[in-house]
Amino acid sequence: MTTATAAPPQNTTKVVNDFSFSIATANGSGSQTANMVLLRGLFKMGIPVSGKNMFPSNIQGLPTWFTIRVNKDGWIGRATTPDIIVCMNPESAVEDVENARKGAVLIYDDSLGLSKMRPDCIHYPVPFKKLVVDACPDLKLRKLVINMLYVGVCSALFNISEESLVAALESQLKTKPKAVLANKPAIQLGRKWALENIKKVDAFSCEPLNKTSNKIIIEGNAATALGLMFNGCTAVAWYPITPSSSLCESLEDYMRDYRVNPDGKRTFAVVQAEDEIAACGMITGAGWAGARAFTSTSGPGVSLMNEMIGLGYFAEIPFVICNVARTGPSTGLPTRTMQGDIISVIYASHGDTKHVAVFPSNPKEAFEMAGIALDLAEQLQTPVFINSDLDLGMNYWMSDRFDYPTGPIKRGKVLHKEDLEKLKGQWARYKDVDGDGIGYRTLPGTDHPNAAYFTRGTGHTEQATYSEKATDWKKNMDRLTRKFNTAKTLVPKPVIENKGSTIGLLYFGTTDSSVREAASILEQQHGVRIDLCRLRAFPFSKEVEDFLDKHAVVYVCEMNRDAQMAMVIRAELPNAATKIRSILHYDGLPLTAGVVVSEFLAQHKNEPHSTAVAQQLSQATSAVGSKGRD
Amino acid sequence: MTTATAAPPQNTTKVVNDFSFSIATANGSGSQTANMVLLRGLFKMGIPVSGKNMFPSNIQGLPTWFTIRVNKDGWIGRATTPDIIVCMNPESAVEDVENARKGAVLIYDDSLGLSKMRPDCIHYPVPFKKLVVDACPDLKLRKLVINMLYVGVCSALFNISEESLVAALESQLKTKPKAVLANKPAIQLGRKWALENIKKVDAFSCEPLNKTSNKIIIEGNAATALGLMFNGCTAVAWYPITPSSSLCESLEDYMRDYRVNPDGKRTFAVVQAEDEIAACGMITGAGWAGARAFTSTSGPGVSLMNEMIGLGYFAEIPFVICNVARTGPSTGLPTRTMQGDIISVIYASHGDTKHVAVFPSNPKEAFEMAGIALDLAEQLQTPVFINSDLDLGMNYWMSDRFDYPTGPIKRGKVLHKEDLEKLKGQWARYKDVDGDGIGYRTLPGTDHPNAAYFTRGTGHTEQATYSEKATDWKKNMDRLTRKFNTAKTLVPKPVIENKGSTIGLLYFGTTDSSVREAASILEQQHGVRIDLCRLRAFPFSKEVEDFLDKHAVVYVCEMNRDAQMAMVIRAELPNAATKIRSILHYDGLPLTAGVVVSEFLAQHKNEPHSTAVAQQLSQATSAVGSKGRD
Amino acid sequence: MAGTTEAAPPAESKQPQVNLIGLSKKDYGGLKSTLCIGCGHDLITARIIDACYNLGVRPENVAKLSGIGCSSKTPAYFLNRSHGFNSVHGRMPAIATGVQMANKNLKMIAVSGDGDSANIGMGHFVHVMRRNLNLLYIVENNGVYGLTKGQFSATADKGSKQKSGNVNPNEPIDLCEMAYMLGCGFVARLFAGNSKQMTSVIEAAIAYKGLAFLDIISPCVTFNNHEGSTKSFAYAKGNEEPLHDIGFVPAYDPTYMEMDHGEEREITLSDGSHITLKALSKDFDPSDRVAAGNQIMEAKHSKKILTGLIYVNPKSELLMDQMQVIDTPLSLLTEKETRPAESVLKQIMDDLA
Amino acid sequence: MAGTTEAAPPAESKQPQVNLIGLSKKDYGGLKSTLCIGCGHDLITARIIDACYNLGVRPENVAKLSGIGCSSKTPAYFLNRSHGFNSVHGRMPAIATGVQMANKNLKMIAVSGDGDSANIGMGHFVHVMRRNLNLLYIVENNGVYGLTKGQFSATADKGSKQKSGNVNPNEPIDLCEMAYMLGCGFVARLFAGNSKQMTSVIEAAIAYKGLAFLDIISPCVTFNNHEGSTKSFAYAKGNEEPLHDIGFVPAYDPTYMEMDHGEEREITLSDGSHITLKALSKDFDPSDRVAAGNQIMEAKHSKKILTGLIYVNPKSELLMDQMQVIDTPLSLLTEKETRPAESVLKQIMDDLA
Ligand SMILES: Cc1ncc(C[n+]2csc(CCOP(=O)(O)OP(=O)(O)O)c2C)c(N)n1
Ligand SMILES: Cc1ncc(C[n+]2csc(CCOP(=O)(O)OP(=O)(O)O)c2C)c(N)n1
Ligand code: SF4
Ligand code: SF4
Ligand SMILES: [Mg+2]
Ligand SMILES: [Mg+2]
């Protein structure tokens, strides 16, 4: 039937394993499975991929975009503009096409009437509506199955192995053999039709690689859930909020599978609370009484938990909150991403408070840091935050496989009956016996007449009795400062990539791949070498301070308007204040390498250090010595 | 009867109008009236005074201390250690005496058995329990009236005019003539007894002055309430919390007296909400619908309001929150003071948020800033904070009389029916027509078919329609930054005292008198001249930046552990970061000049700038020019 | 199937029909709904439009309020000419109280969800029921959190099984019983499929000067569909398994069920579940407080869902009147009206000297 | 008059009397109370001590919980040998839920105030009533916010006049009615002055395996004393005016009022107000749910305060058992018990590859 319309300048140089898709559908139309099959099919070919879903805060009918980036070098940050656009949604089709980059490939239903638009693009109209009639005898299922047709079309056009796709379909719908049966023909038919009817004029194609053999594909929320399950998390309370809900939901699912004794008894308790204040209150109660306690939420929930977090800090209760951040302020964009709650989390609650926080960059770290956070909370007897975001939490990430935790679970300083007997009941809850600012606690239920102490959010003595005395107050607050300093030595250290440059770039969390991609572009295409420091925790450990000390200029890259992490650095480490520049991105979408490159270059040009830096740079490598990534 | 016991080295040099009392009683024992009579009696003699109440978070029975500072130079900050201690509370008497400074005057009931203690102090035991039998025939009233006896004793000992005390009693109990009748004899009897029985060996005495003629005595909370009443505040919602409750309580009292029409109809509405979230929600609704809306609270309330504050910021709703800060974190010390919610207030809520805040230093400013805050909220269409604290809010301050507001009440950019008619209904809620980041709004109920718009905490366009578009989000956030910059030009400027020094001292709020007293001590006794900058608002106006620019070292003095204001300055004004030093005080009690002096000297000594500064100092005065206090 | 168009009267002539105050139905419309096809909430939206049109409500005099949720989105879909405020989750009652303080002359129409009102907002719900605002308060009750994808709310049926397999051990909270108990002056329960009853009760509720609470059963066609739920889709089982796709939302027709006074009928919802509705009889006197209480108790014991106007207190004083607030909206008071004279300040200062 | 000493049994011999588990009354004591002399709360404290002593409760196995307020301070005044947690205002029910999750074997004794539970904590109160924790939940109900100096709470009587002159226009919230309605399995109302009834019901409540809710009328002797309050002090008027001093708290003796089953008596509280107490009769069967409901309704209509055990559900399953939580407290589980095998992780990883 149709072939490509009015040819744009045909691409002659082949682009292999380095391009991106955007698949536009309507929310609730069931395209998610098709997109996952495409993503996983590519992954099964050994090609690095990432899948990011830009969905609306709605259940059915509004436009949604799934982007897949295929990148042989393993850069899995968001691609700036898609090379291939699959338009399945009549509502957004015109705009999607209008916004396409010059030369992009457009795949759409031929009834959408898009062929007259954008002669500078490559058009592949497909009669999806007609084809689905053949592909799916069951009328009710057609709306669903139609999505699998574009998977088949893409298979043909971009040389995505049919076998991989079918394998992906099967693993995707593992427990639903009938669904596999319904969908498989659609892939095959789409592929067949495209092979027979489309004349390929674009440059994009795939070839098998072997870069995914030790990898998995997983959402960050599921990774965090696994980390919690494997690290002794016992009490979970939560209140639904996008994009965090799937964390506690999958945590409960996993635990129901793997944390139940043969007699059906569970080694965990999960409660859906009436609101976030209650959720935080529950883990406060649970942490106090000795559980490894956890909740997840997003910005509005953190705001609501503020008072309770302050109680946790001051009464020294261990619990972990994972903030899967979305775009704020206020209700903001519930289905978009941001690193916008840095200040809100780190300094949560009134009075003098500073909280320990970790910043995972990828699913593997999300897995590991879940355990680290639970440990830190109990070691430090304080609330600990995991700062994730929608991009990590809800998108599909290619990740290294997770290692089984070998170290012991760290329960911190708890005195049990036997300890109390040895101490002859002599102990004081808030006494800094070890000089690290951390006292010893007992758990309710400990069977010793001197086990009990009284916990409160009001002023207290070392013996945990009520006190309004000025000296008691100050002494206690100073001990909490000491504890904070102890935290600096316990939190995960930054990941530093040292190339001997005088320019540093500091970042954290989900911008990892885009920032490193940008650094490689800057080095290869612009001749600027940059040292990288990926923050992994607050408070800042000595290594972070050193990094700031050793560089003349440090760009801080983050996804918020106010440069919140840069503000925190200036607040906490004054000496670094004047050398900090900011690279900011805050439109709700994940960061791209392109933004980092252009923002960096724009500022670097005007930098008084710029020339000096360039000079230093040329001599630097040997002088400073390249430590590599440590 | 008794005279002073075992004489300590008698003071020969007379100390006139420059000393302090501490009166120790039990909470709920009714000593407040007596203390106020003493305070006001001194005030009526024309002598500058201040009264600070250190009371427990309890209703009856626990120790409470009322301190009165008498100071001819007008320094009304807290005195470091009291010169005269009146011990009426058996519970705390021994400790009170133990903690007395050497040479202090001790007045106590002779049955307390304190006479053997502290021979280095001046003892004036008084048979209060016996005297009260004569002073008060009514048995039930004796527990109360006994307090008035020490007023009489002090009158005799320290030459406090009996007339002034009686006048004070009468104005204190204006509406209760019978109470005046019951108490007056006690003053007289106490005075008579002391004149006849105590041999005065201490140095302290009072002499009439004329330094209070244009002054009043008032608590800051009442001052703020008056400012609200005189500046068109119409809607008030609140939830009780110490030390803010008396603000809304006195506001309602005042309004019931002065904001009721002849027909009994009120020009205000006050609702006691079910909690702080609701209180903040109510003023959000009221501000949205066009009222001048207000709530007061303290730290825990601010924490709870976090989510709602973010809605106010992002949906651009005008309302005012007065945070009467107490000692935190958590429930902390509800009856002690602190400047500990700086970060909590300024960056309240998740996402990118920065809030406008004013910092009154004394009752007169509390009065004026209440109006300024209401105006700023409506001009900027945003929540505005008044940052007060327990010391200002609940203690008795000598203050200049308040000036009747003459300027017009500023209602900001509101389009009424007529405006819409002129515009032919063409307007967009969030359009930056004037380039100041502030759009025009309409009020619900405006009788024009195009008046309505839809308000939300989610992403929106200029036309106030829902949007998840990246460009819409960013554009809106950037406009909010513009608005923030506009705020810099509208907020109260700092008060700067320029003596041409290269050393600056920046501070704010209730530390005013102590800081200025310290500066005068440093200049007169230590030869160090310091320029002062009293911050009065966030965001920082240009004058604050200039002050930081122009000084080599700037000490930031504040009452919290973490140097929160210094952190904010470093975060917001990076260039100043390295020149900032902190003088901190955080034990729950108001700052004293002594702390500032010793902290300054300790740091100044180690300061590399110190010598350079000293040198500059000697030449500076003429060179830089003394602008005086502006 | 957006609320704005669905119920438009047949256009007989070219001139649009108008109501008492000369407005057409279109003048009461809103934006196109973005809810799922078949969602009960859209039916309620349409009835709100009808009722306002029928009564000749001046839209400029209405404020629309909501919290967060699918239900809370609906104020955008009716009365475009009224100011609207889609606030934060669970706090709408507080916002409404404030709006009324600022402008006592506004009629407020508020829409909330069961999650919004019975879970996170329970405290505010309870307290606003004790404040007699001029407010129509609708809970669009589907027993789930629609917008966050189907977790159970506090009004979910006992015995329902969650996706995770947990059985809901709790009795559902009955918001009508609560409202009645707390002294609310107008309490009704309705079913989104019964448009005649809905329209008439919504009209009465808008006309009522006081807080009128409506608990409207409004099925979520998308999220009561997992096995074991008492509201599971009958055909989403066995060989229909492919429908269990992540993120696929099948479309359903809304269930209509017009009932007469006194009628009792068991119906099958679009989602396959059964409920028994019982419309209050014509001679039931909702102004009899004790009788109303008995009806609520009885229905509860017999597990029936009583629909209709359960209780009305015809003589209730509005909060703003109780508080003696001036008739001019506070929002419109001028400086002159709100700043006491200079002499007042002088007097106060003298007293403090 | 601190609760710890007031009710100590007369020391007949030198050896202190001991209970079932060999502990003396002193072992159940706490710190000295810092409440006002005559405060009803102290009487309740004393009865909690009695009940625990009488039952032979092991203090180490109890967790004491509270929110913020005068009432919430009291856990410091009993059971020194139990862990205590004085948390934040209104959130105790959430904390209690968490404690129970961590350790299902603990008996929890929680004390709250009417402001703490019926105002700021209303949402949590409602929801915890639906969760069957092993919790004795006491509200020490005085109709005011004691600790913040006398503002009215949501249980304040209708018609009371606030200091500011505002008349309280709202019906008081009846927490027992709510608890009953929400499915709480043990509901009682008591009066702090009636120690016999209090001790026996508190004993029953502690012995009850489930959530037992007690609403105990506990007069605030200090803050129901302004004119116009329905609980104003009779003698704080006219020529007693000097007592109106800022911050003066007169001392009162607590009111004692022992009553028999079925007895009805009007009493004058220490603050001069009148209330009618009606003790449930001996043959009333609190396990009859419908009868209990009727009693509540009747008492409400006749404006009497019903005291005694109103409702008990003898067969209620604890939430942690419903949730199939293992018998060992979760807090004590070891790494071995809470870390699935390496093979599990391998399997999961393989599935994701
Ligand atoms: C503070 C806060 N917590 C959680 C959420 C996430 N959230 C959005 S809507 C919703 C529940 C809505 O349920 P319901 O009120 O029943 O409305 P429905 O969608 O069922 O109509 C939740 C939990 C939020 N927006 N804000
Ligand atoms: C979040 C928060 N808001 C307000 C307060 C102030 N506050 C302390 S106790 C209390 C009310 C206590 O009343 P109630 O629970 O009835 O206890 P009572 O003192 O009457 O026994 C309030 C409002 C607080 N501590 N925390
Ligand atoms: S998810 Fe349910 S409540 Fe939400 S729009 Fe869809 S059907 Fe309606
Ligand atoms: S204020 Fe009232 S509730 Fe508080 S201790 Fe005193 S009498 Fe008891
Ligand atoms: Mg719902
Ligand atoms: Mg109370």
Image (spheres, coloured by chain):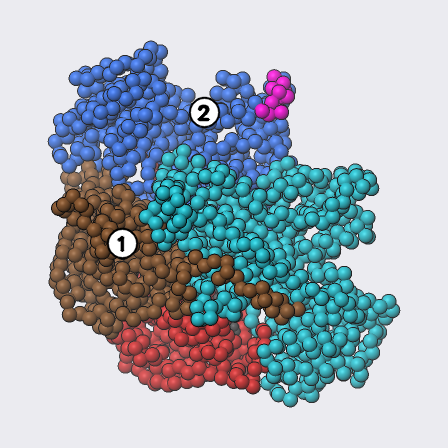
Chain colours: A blue, B cyan, C brown, D red
Query: Circle 2 sits in a helix, a strand or a loop, which is it?
Result: helix
Residue at image position (59%, 67%) is: C343
Q: Quadrant of the C terminus of chain D?
A: top left
Q: Give the image quarter of residue C351.
A: bottom right
Q: Amino acid at mark 1?
A: Glu
Residue at image position (72%, 65%) is: B212
Q: Quadrant of the N terminus of chain D?
A: bottom right
Report the span colored magenta: A606-618
Crowding at dot 1, Cα within 10 Å, few <14 / some 14-19 / many 20+, comes out as: many
Report the disc number at residue C140. Answer: 1
Query: Circle 1 sits in a helix, a strand or a loop, which is it?
Result: strand
Q: Give the image quarter of residue A337.
A: top left
The answer, for residue B43, to whether it is visible in the render is yes
Is D106 placed left or right of B555 in the picture? left
Residue B1's place in the image compared with C191, above or below, is: below
Q: Residue lying at the far top in this picture: please name it.
A: A12
Q: Position of residue B187 (x, y in %)?
A: 71, 80
Residue at image position (60%, 69%) is: C347
User: How far apart, in angstroms, are the residues tagged by discs 1 and 2?
Assistant: 46 Å
Q: How many marks?
A: 2
Assess whether residue A609 is covered by the magenta stretch: yes
Assess whether residue A607 is covered by the magenta stretch: yes
Crowding at dot 2, Cα within 10 Å, few <14 / some 14-19 / many 20+, comes out as: some
Host chain of mark 2: A
The residue identified by callout 2 is A594
Q: Position of residue C141 (x, y in %)?
A: 26, 54
> Would the CB of label 1 be found within 8 Å of ligand 1?
yes
Q: Nearer the viewer, residue C343 or A64?
A: C343
Q: Position of residue C229 (x, y in %)?
A: 22, 51
Q: Nearer the viewer, residue B172 or B371?
A: B371
Magenta residues, dominant SS class: helix
Q: Amino acid at mark 2?
A: Gly
